[in-house]
Image (cartoon, grey):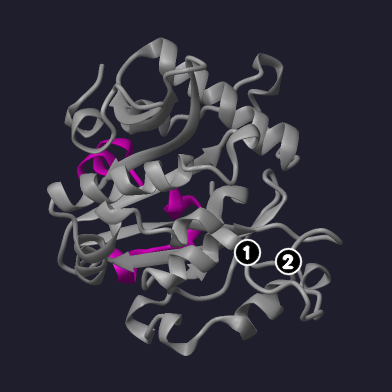
Amino acid sequence: MKNMYAETLIPPSKKLECFITNSETLIKEAQVLRYRVFAQEMGAELKTKSEGLDYDDVDSYCEHLIVYDNCNKKIVGYTRLLNQYQAKLLGRFYSQTEFNLNQVLAMPGRFLEIGRTCVDPDYRGSAVLTTLWSALVQYAVDGEYNYLLGCASISPGPSGFAVDAVYRNIDLKNIAPASYQVKPNIPVPDSLRCQRDESGIPPLLKAYLRFGALVCGEPYWDEDFNCMDLFILLPLDQLKDRYSKHYMRGYQATNEIETAAIV
């Protein structure tokens, strides 16, 4: 079922449209895309491997935001959205399985968690994630949320990113103050904290930082997904200003995140 975001942001006459779906068929198709990205591409060990799907108990409480290619008739981008009321019914935000968020969630305001963001590998470098991000921002603004939260992943290993080098490259203005700091439930093992500097910052994280996101403490080691997760908090008051000034005119900074994903 489509909602106003399809008509407001991406007219159906265009190649891409972005909307919240309640269709079981489309949600399952999105879970197939998630499996391709997280399991087949990134090497995640999923309990649902035998089904060729990525799903968990969080999915049934979320809203599912998809980018749909009208020409090829398929989902090419995805993220799931979990607000604080849905999280209360579930019993937690997904991020709470990785971090102690008591200090963050004690702040006044409305929270919206994003997760499982991914783009079809054949569509990276296109407008897919820009389309997805635009609809997400519109959703958050219309819903009067105060904070976006989620986990940005860093993949270790020879082709990945060195977590300590990433932290050294983060501008001080993007490091959360003490009141926003969180602690990981499972810290990254010392053996994975290589020191090389050539990695820089992963594209997805770099894009979030440009929008004013805060990195809130040390990373979590996600063994199932074979990655290190940083907890990210994005105050939406400053994002609204950037959105109104730039995004509806095709703000391009998010094009850099086409090659990344978050869980």
Above or below 49: residue 92: below
Above or below 198: residue 13: above
Q: How would you rate the neighbour count of disc 2 (Cα within 10 Å): few for under 14, some for 14-19, many for 20 or more?
A: many
| Residue 248 x %, y % | 25, 52
Q: Is residue 71 covered in magenta?
A: no
Q: Main secondary structure of the magenta part?
A: helix
Q: Which residue is mark 2?
A: 161
| Residue 253 x %, y % | 45, 62
Mark 1: amino acid: Pro
Depth check: 54 or 205 in front?
205
Point 70% across, 34% down: residue = 39
**Residue sitting farthest toward the right:** 158
Q: Are marks 1 and 2 in contact (CB under 8 Å)?
A: yes
Query: Magenta stretch?
Result: 85-105
> For residue 202, which numbered disc appears in the image?
1
| Residue 23 x %, y % | 34, 14
User: Which element type, helix, strand or loop, lies under badge 1?
Assistant: loop
